[in-house]
Image (cartoon, grey):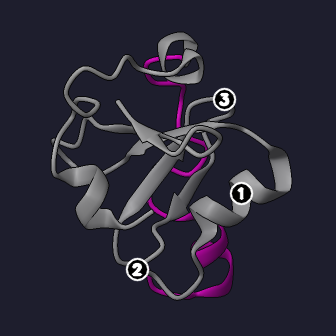
């Protein structure tokens, strides 16, 4: 998933219904580390953009960041949906179905 792909639109492609994961995901759990990427804060690393897991509130950095911690969180936990944790960002991404919503 690239940042450009998911930020292009908040809606699925024309005629496509959001996947079940996107339909049932919590709108916005409490962020575990509202000040930034959990792993980057712990190691003093930098991030490009932030993503938040809608299952547990983990905040991780995007795939344009060196750590790619949002994707690593999905791979470690299987939590399917994350959303932008940037000011004004509203899109969500399902890792399982590779679909934005």
Q: Is residue 11 left or right of residue 100?
A: left
Residue 35's disc number: none
* Magenta stretch holds residue 86: no
> Dot 3 corresponds to which residue?
55
Residue toward you, 47 or 21: 21
> Dot 1 corresponds to which residue?
73
> Dot 2 corresponds to which residue?
64
Q: Quote the CA–CA distance across marks 2 and 3.
A: 22 Å
Residue stretch in magenta: 26-47
Where is residue 45 drawn, in percent x and y?
Answer: 54, 88
Q: Earlier in the sequence, mark 2 or mark 1?
A: 2
Q: Earlier in the sequence, mark 2 or mark 3?
A: 3
Q: Quote the CA–CA distance across marks 2 and 1.
A: 15 Å
Q: Quarter holding the N terminus?
A: bottom left
For the residues labelled 1 and 3, say whether their Cβ atoms are less than 8 Å apart.
Answer: no
* Magenta stretch holds residue 41: yes
């Amino acid at each position: 998933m690239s940042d450009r792909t998911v930020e292009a639109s908040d809606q699925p492609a024309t005629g496509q219904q959001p996947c079940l994961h996107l339909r049932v995901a919590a709108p916005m759990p409490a962020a575990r580390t509202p000040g930034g990427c959990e792993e980057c804060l712990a190691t003093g690393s930098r991030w490009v953009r932030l993503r938040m897991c809608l299952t547990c509130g983990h905040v991780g950095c995007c795939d344009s960041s060196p750590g790619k911690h949002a994707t690593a969180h999905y791979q470690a936990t299987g939590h399917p949906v994350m959303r932008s944790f940037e000011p004004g960002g509203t899109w969500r991404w399902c890792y399982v179905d590779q679909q934005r919503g």
